[in-house]
Image (cartoon, rainbow, N blue to C red):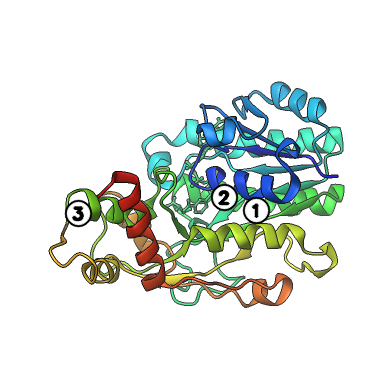
């Protein structure tokens, strides 16, 4: 039986992935951890450990205590926040990953999931239908850490035979937990503001296309990749995952169908330059072929669910 450690369980992805993994593997087999307190649903539903990923001895002690066989390492500082504080963010994103890889090698924990991002691409990358392999010249501290991380995953796989797995998530949209300081966060905030105030000031320009994905599709993809027979996986660094592609004006129009008096204005900030350096859409045929990536949600379906769930949250 696998025992799983999740690092960064209180975040946008962790708060949903933890619950889904507990359904599959059993509550006591999924150990949640974060540097901050997680929601009660997570802390009451199974083991929870308060720990900083940079305190690797403490993480190693948790691994031994629970007989961990798989790690989902989600802790990171996202693109927008990382630009505000480059070197400390590099430490969390890069040193955090390297310490985990070394600790796993020493303690013989073989399987790791670590998410990469569309941020690995840069201004010289083809922006439309970005292929699995192409020029990658990220110019954000977050993107540089993700690209370096992908190469370290490939290194540990080749040199030490570790089973490291990764996807390049696009921007993720969800209603359960707030987004964690990224460039794609507008696509979460806009739904909250539509329900709470019927107006939104967007920090990206109206025609900024980015690849995006609804959280249930992201969780399904992550678990599907982790459960695929290793012999089928041809990609040694990180798999492209495309989802959908839309711009703020598209989301605005989709919401307006449900809330006719919703208004939007645009005040692009430093995140516009980050978004402009990223792909607009992603080609993910290698993921479809290797491990069966597929999607359920488009912008319209997602918008209906986002609005309904946020309404419930705020009793609106
Ligand atoms: P998030 O910011 O919502 O959550 C990250 C979690 O990590 C937080 O709960 C935070 O408290 C925790 N954390 C931060 N520093 C830590 C430390 N030193 N020790 C332990 N925990 C720490 O981020 P997320 O959106 O859930 O992203 C999870 C992973 O997925 C990250 O690696 C991120 O780069 C990647 N990713 C996310 C998206 C997205 O759109 N959400 C897209 C691409 C990639
Ligand atoms: N959603 C993430 C961010 O904007 C992409 O990795 O930082």
- Where in the figure is residue 268, as x and y percent of width and height? 22, 54
What element does badge 2 sit on? helix
Q: Is residue 59 placed above or below 194 in the rendered structure?
A: above
- Where in the figure is residue 72, as x and y percent of width and height? 67, 44
Question: In whole angstroms, how far apart are the C-alphas of marks 3 and 2?
Answer: 30 Å
> Mark 3 or 2, which is nearer the eye?
3
Q: Which numbered disc flags the more N-terminal residue, 3 or 2?
A: 2
What element does badge 1 sit on? helix
Q: Badge 1: few (under 14), some or many (20 or more) residues near its Cα, within 10 Å? A: many
User: From the viewer's perspective, is 153 left or right of 149?
Assistant: right
What element does badge 3 sit on? strand
Quarter of the image with the N terminus is top right
Q: Residue at x 41, y 46 (%)?
A: 179
Q: Residue 146 carries which label?
A: 2
Question: In whole angstroms, how far apart are the C-alphas of marks 1 and 2?
Answer: 6 Å
- Where in the figure is residue 219, as x and y percent of width and height? 59, 57
Nearer-the-camera pick, 12 or 210: 12
Q: Is residue 52 placed above or below 155 in the rendered structure?
A: above
Q: Ligand 1: does it lie within 8 Å of the C-beta at label 2?
A: yes
Q: Badge 3: few (under 14), some or many (20 or more) residues near its Cα, within 10 Å? A: many
User: From the viewer's perspective, is 13 left or right of 54?
Assistant: left
Asked where in the image residue 199 lies, by quadrant, the reply is: bottom left
User: From the viewer's perspective, is 107 left or right of 47?
Assistant: right
Asked where in the image residue 241 lies, by quadrant, the reply is: bottom right
Contact flag, marks 1 and 2 (Cβ < 8 Å): yes
- Where in the figure is residue 208, as x and y percent of width and height? 30, 66
Nearer-the-camera pick, 70 or 123: 70
> Mark 3 or 1, which is nearer the eye?
3
Disc 1 marks which residue? 150
Can residue 32 be seen here?
yes
Q: Which mark is residue 68?
A: none
Disc 3 marks which residue? 200
């Amino acid at each position: 039986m696998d025992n799983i450690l999740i690092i960064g369980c209180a975040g946008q992805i962790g708060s949903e992935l933890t619950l889904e993994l507990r359904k599959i593997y059993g509550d006591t087999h999924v150990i949640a951890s974060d540097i901050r307190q997680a929601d009660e649903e997570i802390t009451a539903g199974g083991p929870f450990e308060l720990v900083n990923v940079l305190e690797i001895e403490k993480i190693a002690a948790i691994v031994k205590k629970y007989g961990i066989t798989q790690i989902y390492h989600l802790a990171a500082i996202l693109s927008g926040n990382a630009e505000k504080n480059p070197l400390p963010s590099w430490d969390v994103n890069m040193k955090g990953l390297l310490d985990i890889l070394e600790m796993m090698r020493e303690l013989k924990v073989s399987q790791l999931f670590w998410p990469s991002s569309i941020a690995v691409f840069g201004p010289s990358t083809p922006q439309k239908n970005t292929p699995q392999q192409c020029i990658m010249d990220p110019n954000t501290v977050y993107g540089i850490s993700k690209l370096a991380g992908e190469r370290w995953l490939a290194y540990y796989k080749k040199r030490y035979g570790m089973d490291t797995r990764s996807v390049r998530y696009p921007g993720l949209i969800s209603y359960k937990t707030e987004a964690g300081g990224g460039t794609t966060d507008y696509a979460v905030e806009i739904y909250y503001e539509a329900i709470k105030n019927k107006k939104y000031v967007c920090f990206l320009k109206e025609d900024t296309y980015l690849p995006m994905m609804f959280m249930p599709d992201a969780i399904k993809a992550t678990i599907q990749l982790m459960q695929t027979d290793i012999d089928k996986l041809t990609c040694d660094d990180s798999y492209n995952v495309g989802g959908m592609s839309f711009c703020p004006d598209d989301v605005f129009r989709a919401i307006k169908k449900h809330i006719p008096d919703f208004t939007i204005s645009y005040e692009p900030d430093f995140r516009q330059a980050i978004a402009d350096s990223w792909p607009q859409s992603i080609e993910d045929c290698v993921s479809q072929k290797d491990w069966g990536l597929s999607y359920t949600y488009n912008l319209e379906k997602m918008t209906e669910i986002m609005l309904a769930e946020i309404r419930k949250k705020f009793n609106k």
